[in-house]
Image (cartoon, rainbow, N blue to C red):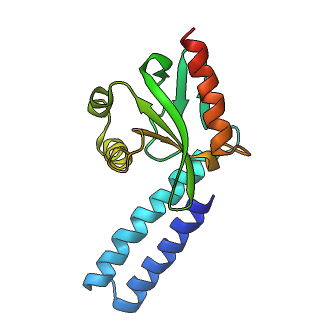
């Protein structure tokens, strides 16, 4: 929810740039690009948080993550590909990070934005997959990590 509010605030700032500088100026064009980008981020956030939508699906075979714009929507990650799972924090944002056994293979299967997000995570010492608890209504990062770890442990028995 906070990401949606932030994106809408950036849209407002970008529109103010267009109005103040004129649509044909450099700042006006920059404002237009920013307004479109952050508008799309807000729309993606609203779609992710829609009523009845599954944010994170855990099964005995693996998990599906729908919590962020860079999620692997519809792709099941088998527990056999998971090395470890941990709760983490980056600049006041709680999350769950998933470390994979074959990171290079995983990266090669992603599109541009998804691959960029995964590389961002890896460059900061986190796993390639980041799950945002804010999209999982009422759940905290530590609770999600513990639940996912119980599924992971069960899959290895």
- For residue 138, side relative to residue 152 (left or right): right
1 or 121, which is in the foreground?
121
Question: Which residue occupies 54% across, 38% down?
Answer: 86
Where, quadrant-wise, is the N terminus in this rendering?
A: bottom right
Quadrant in which residue 141 is drawn: top right
Q: Position of residue 36 (x, y in %)?
A: 40, 65
As drawn, 73 above or below 88: above
Inspect this view and state whether residue 114 appears. yes
The one of 35 and 119 positioned closer to us in this rendering: 119
Picture layout, residue 61 above or below residue 137: above
Q: Position of residue 94 (x, y in %)?
A: 58, 52
- Work out whether residue 60 can be spotted: no
Q: Quadrant of the C terminus?
A: top right
Image point (29%, 44%), residue name: 112
Q: Is residue 1 left or right of residue 102?
A: right
- From what the image shows, is residue 153 above or below residue 134? above
Query: Where is residue 82 shown, x and y percent of the image?
Result: 45, 24
* Residue 109 point in image, percent of width and height: 30, 30
Height in image: 91 above or below 133?
below
């Amino acid at each position: 929810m906070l990401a949606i509010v932030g994106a809408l605030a950036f849209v407002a700032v970008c529109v103010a740039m267009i109005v103040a500088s004129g649509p044909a100026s450099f700042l006006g064009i920059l404002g237009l690009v920013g307004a479109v980008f952050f508008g799309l981020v807000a729309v993606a956030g609203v779609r992710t948080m829609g009523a009845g939508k599954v944010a994170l699906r855990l099964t005995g075979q693996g998990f599906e993550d729908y919590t962020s714009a860079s999620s692997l929507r519809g792709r099941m990650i088998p527990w056999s590909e998971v090395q470890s799972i941990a709760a983490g924090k980056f600049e006041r944002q709680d999350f769950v990070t998933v470390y994979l056994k074959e990171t290079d293979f995983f990266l090669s299967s992603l599109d541009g934005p998804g691959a960029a997000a995964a590389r961002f995570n890896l460059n900061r010492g986190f796993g390639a997959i980041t799950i945002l608890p804010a999209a999982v209504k009422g759940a905290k990062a530590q609770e999600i990590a513990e639940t996912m770890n119980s599924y992971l442990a069960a899959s290895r028995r």
